[in-house]
Amino acid sequence: MIPIVQKLTAFQRGALLERLLALSVEDRLLRFGMLTNDDTIRRYVEKIDFVSDRVFGIFGLDLRLIGAAHLALNHQNRFAEIGVSVNAGERRHGYGLALLQRAKLHAVNRGFRTFFMCCLSENKTMVHLAHLAGFKVVVEQGDVDAHLKLEAPNIGGVALEAVEDQIAVMDLFWKQQLQWFAVPVRAA
């Protein structure tokens, strides 16, 4: 199944918070690059600016976020930085790469010139994703810095993003309908 990536809005902040709070201690370390407690995650999610930055997610059939990416956009210097995480039980299905590629497409279409990703060197999954996505990866003192020069926007990329947005809307609609039909009917 091809992962369908949604653009999240501030209305979905709670779903993002729930997803990040569910990360294990090890996964929190890999996602944030440091030990992170619940309060730190709450503050992080509260401070995300859904207008300036972009957050992408993949919802399961149960409408729970199974993966998310925060694309922090530096509008002044025209660079973008991404942080990605996918639920442990949902890995190896292409969700992380789908989130990374969707965020890259968005950054390109907005005229950003450089795409960054930083992680701990023990985060083998993110290092692998960076290589797959064509990032130049540099390992220094336990940290990995990856960057990618982005191409100029073009009409094909803009059209592709518009189509992906429409597919995402329909995907969410159908998953909501499945949830509605899954609710058992109570006898009167």
Image (tube, grey):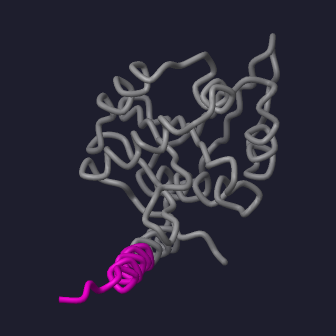
Seen in the picture, residue 77 relative to 184 is either above or below; the reply is above
x, y percent for residue 157: 51, 68
Residue at 36% across, 35% down: 75
Q: Assess whether residue 148 is covered by the magenta stretch.
A: no
Seen in the picture, residue 149 relative to 132 is either above or below; the reply is above
Seen in the picture, residue 149 relative to 182 is either above or below; the reply is above
Of residues 69 and 132, the one drawn nearer to the viewer in this rendering: 69
x, y percent for residue 25: 63, 26
Of residues 44 and 83, the one drawn nearer to the viewer in this rendering: 44
Left or right position of 84 against 90: left
- Residue at the limit of the structure toward the top, as seen here: 141
The answer to which quarter of the image holds residue 174 is bottom left
Q: Quadrant of the C terminus?
A: bottom left
x, y percent for residue 163: 44, 78
Left or right position of 121 against 24: right
Q: What's the magenta region? A: 166-188
Residue at 52% across, 52% down: 103
Q: How many marks?
A: 0
Left or right position of 70 against 32: left
Residue at 74% across, 43% down: 130
- Residue at the limit of the structure toward the left, as seen here: 188
Q: Main secondary structure of the magenta part?
A: helix
Q: Quadrant of the N terminus?
A: bottom right
Residue at 34% across, 79% down: 183
The answer to which quarter of the image holds residue 29 is top right
Seen in the picture, residue 20 relative to 9 is either above or below; the reply is above
- Residue at the limit of the structure toward the front, as seen here: 188
Of residues 188 and 125, the one drawn nearer to the viewer in this rendering: 188
Of residues 10 and 184, the one drawn nearer to the viewer in this rendering: 184
x, y percent for residue 153: 49, 59
Q: Assess whether residue 167 is covered by the magenta stretch.
A: yes
